[in-house]
Image (cartoon, helix red, strand yellow):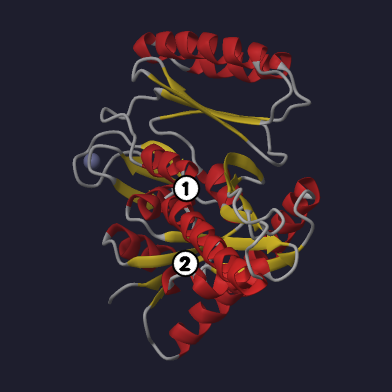
Amino acid sequence: MNDLSELIRELSEMYDADSRDTYITLYINKDKNVKCLEKRERACKSLLSGEEQKNFTNTMEEIKEFLNKNAGDTLAIFASRIHNFFKTVSLPTKVNNSLIVDSSPYIRPLARIQDEWESFTLILLNSHYAKIFSVSLGSVDREKNLSSNIMNKHRKGGMSQARFQRLRKGAIHAFFSEVEGALEKIADKQIVLAGPGQAKLQFQDMLSKHLAERIVEIIDIDIDDEQQLLKESVRLISKREEQKSHDAVQQLKSEILKDGLAAYGLDDTLQAVKNGQVELLIVEKDYKLKGGLCEHCQIVRAGHVKNCPMCGRPTSEVDVIEEIIEFAERTDADIEFTDDEEISNLGHIGAILRFK
Ligand SMILES: [Zn+2]
């Protein structure tokens, strides 16, 4: 798991057990400044009272301080002073500016960006140099350099050509093993392999099966063309992602037709996700549905629900789809966002199940 999936998972598990509106979520574009927030901030503040209002004011102070220091970034911020929580993520793409005060962090836009900008591992190598990049949200998170300085120089005097070649082969093999070891530790689910000439293919041949299977693209490129390579690999991965969300809808359709491992429509999908049955959740991109949530019982109902049908406590108004996404994250389901028309005909949401 990478850092972003871990964060989304963590956010999906957080809520105020007393249903108080104590979590602030902010999505904000870099061309907007703190001023644009002020109207929304005043409105939210006036609607809160007591402890919630105090927490809101304190948390907003912290957020604005952060924004002043990080002007120019497109950001997602999740914060609550009362819960001692403050996390930010730099985003690779424009978002709808929004400030949300709720009993839990609002993760849907972030989950969608994660789906559209899938993380991957990029490895650039030749026979004596390798660089491994972890790419998350379209930019490099971490990188690791490896190099071997043996046997790339001229043949030493007195050594036969055959002996030199043997030693050189051995040295390359040893270097590739070292690179494989490093890759093993940090490789994501998807690997892009790149570099000039044959070295990358020799490296691919010697990889253990579980790593070789994760190679999704191979790019022929000069060893020092890093910027071009990053751009090209991000483009290829996002093209694959489009294909994947299309395939997911096709798979859902075929499971439904044979009455197989699928759920569709709001009620069935909600039930399945709460039972931990969901392998892959498929969500229509912009569909929202108002409903009520009881944080105490973790019960969600669509429509206008003032009080919890179980415990009678007042519910908080939520986007039911957001709640389903949070349940899915908590149970390690994958999520695909799609604008495929067929998903709207099936009730805007559906799932491939692990079991039935
Ligand atoms: Zn309840």
Question: Where is ligand 1, by quadrant?
Answer: top left
The answer to whether residue 14 is left or right of residue 152 is left
**Tally of numbered tags:** 2
The answer to whether residue 205 is left or right of residue 80 is right
Instruction: Please report contact status of discs 2 and 1: CB closer than 8 Å, yes or no.
Output: no
Residue drawn at (68%, 59%) of the image: 155
Question: What amino acid type should be assigned to the residue bearing mark 1?
Answer: Glu
Residue on which the image places disc 1: 322
Q: Position of residue 86 (x, y in %)?
A: 45, 22
In terms of depth relative to the viewer, which is nearer, 317 or 96?
A: 96
In terms of depth relative to the viewer, which is nearer, 353 or 151?
A: 151
Mark 1 C-beta closer than 8 Å to ligand 1: no
Residue drawn at (65%, 12%) of the image: 69
**In this rendering, is residue 257 above or below 146?**
below
* CA neighbours of label 2 inside 10 A, class few (<14), some (14 to 19), many (20+): some
Q: Position of residue 185 (x, y in %)?
A: 42, 51
Q: Quadrant of residue 281?
A: bottom left
Residue drawn at (57%, 80%) of the image: 250
Question: What amino acid type should be assigned to the residue bearing mark 2?
Answer: Leu
Q: Secondary structure at mark 2?
A: helix
Q: Secondary structure at mark 1?
A: helix
Q: State the CA–CA distance, disc 2 to disc 1.
A: 34 Å
Q: Quadrant of residue 248?
A: bottom right
Q: Position of residue 189 (x, y in %)?
A: 49, 61
Q: Quadrant of the C terminus?
A: bottom left
* Residue 339 visible to the viewer: no
Q: Position of residue 24 (x, y in %)?
A: 48, 25
In terms of depth relative to the viewer, which is nearer, 142 or 57?
A: 142
Residue on which the image places disc 2: 211
* Extreme-bottom residue of the structure: 258
Residue drawn at (47%, 68%) of the image: 350
